[in-house]
Amino acid sequence: MRRSGDSGSTWRIGVLFSQSGVTADIERTQFHGTLLAIEEINAAGGVNGHLIEPVALDPASEPARFRALAERLLDDERVEVIAGCYMSSTRKAVLPLLERRNGLLLYPTLYEGFECSRNAVYTGAAPNQNGRQLADYLVGHYGARIYMVGSDYIFPHEANRIMRDLIAQRAGKILAEKYVPLDAVGKDFTAIMRDIRRKQPDVVFSTVVGQATTHLYHAYAEAGFDPVRMPIASLTTTEVEIDAMGVAAATGHLTAAPYFESLDSEANRRFVTSYRRRFGEGERTNASCEAAYFQMHLLAQALARAGGMETERVRTALLGLEYDAPQGRVRVDPDNHHTYLWPRVGRVGADGRFDIVAAADRAVKPDPYRINHDVSGASGEPKPWPAEV
Ligand code: ACM
């Protein structure tokens, strides 16, 4: 039975971002980034005369629900392409289904790497596009004695495994690796704060996600730790989590990502202005929202080339495509279905915005399997990092 995602004059895209549950705040911005791009595409006449129609469902931050709703989108709604997923546990829940039905997942979230599906295009950062740069920055500016705390699911365990390697390569040491439940609250961090006080690391590396992020940073501030001397460094604490926790608890802490709302470029100013006009002046963009936005524009280009929704043709058309995203020009790498992105490190200023303290001078090729482990530059691999700004 063939799907087409084609209902007459519209081309339909499945959209799976949570509106409820522990990661709803960040996923809502991914949903909004997706909608904004679709509205822009449609306002410009659609693709080859077809309007794009999102078919959006709420998977409630639950892997089993992601899987059930992906099945509904593929089998009942007959879509071929799904934009969605934040937590890696939810991506892992839907990907086997897309592989079996030969659909395409557009995944706009940083993740742990070590995956390359023919049925996915990954537009968030792989570890060589955020973790590597963060490790360099931390060791260069704060020290290499690292305390790890994360939410208890696949991404934090894998991101910590990779960070452990990166820190070992830089002659550093991991002092502890602790996990809290996905729905952790303040009391879940009490013993960890005591342990941090005892071990006195140079940096706390956080892979806590969702609403628990607020509780971590609040516990840290209440424990009296000074981010100037001992910051929390993260890949997942974005403008959204800063808004949720409040500026006082966030100031001085670090995040590595390819995009920050504070980026000073014409393309980003246009994006932020359109986003606020559409969703409210108080709303803020972030790296996962930006990836959700630009991947939809990449998809529109691919659909125009493919002339329809058929997976094989859309996949072929997506590979190698480029787009002037708010973060800079991005490109889908035909080698591995991930995206060339612009690594950056930001530190939260007193105004709650990220000051960009280090940035690559070009988009970095994704290396999801970390094939290039060289930190010396002796391999001849171009070294676009670090560059102080
Ligand atoms: C994540 O789970 N990839 C943030």
Image (cartoon, grey):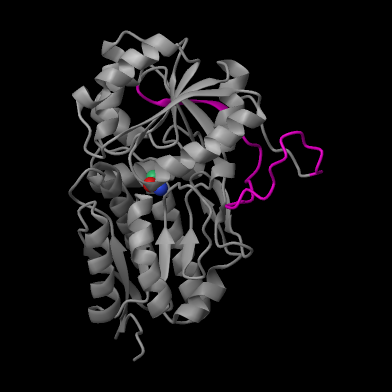
Magenta: predominant secondary structure element? loop
What is the tally of numbered marks visible in this picture?
A: 0
Q: Position of residue 265 (x, y in %)?
A: 52, 38
The N terminus - image quarter: bottom left
Tell me what residue is drawn at x 36 percent, y 72 percent. Answer: 97
The C terminus - image quarter: top right
In this rendering, the answer to whether 166 lies above or below 316 is above
Is 384 in the magenta?
Answer: no
Question: Is any part of residue 32 visible from this angle?
Answer: yes
Question: Is any part of residue 226 visible from this angle?
Answer: no
Tell me what residue is drawn at x 55 percent, y 33 percent. Answer: 164
Q: Nearer the viewer, residue 254 or 342?
A: 254
Is 359 in the magenta?
Answer: yes
Q: Nearer the viewer, residue 83 or 213?
A: 213
User: Which residue is situated farthest in the left direction here?
Assistant: 20
Taking the image as shown, residue 62 lies to the left or right of residue 305, namely left
Magenta residues, as a range?
A: 352-380
Tell me what residue is drawn at x 50 percent, y 22 percent. Answer: 146
Taking the image as shown, residue 11 lies to the left or right of residue 281, namely right
In this rendering, the answer to whether 326 lies above or below 339 is above
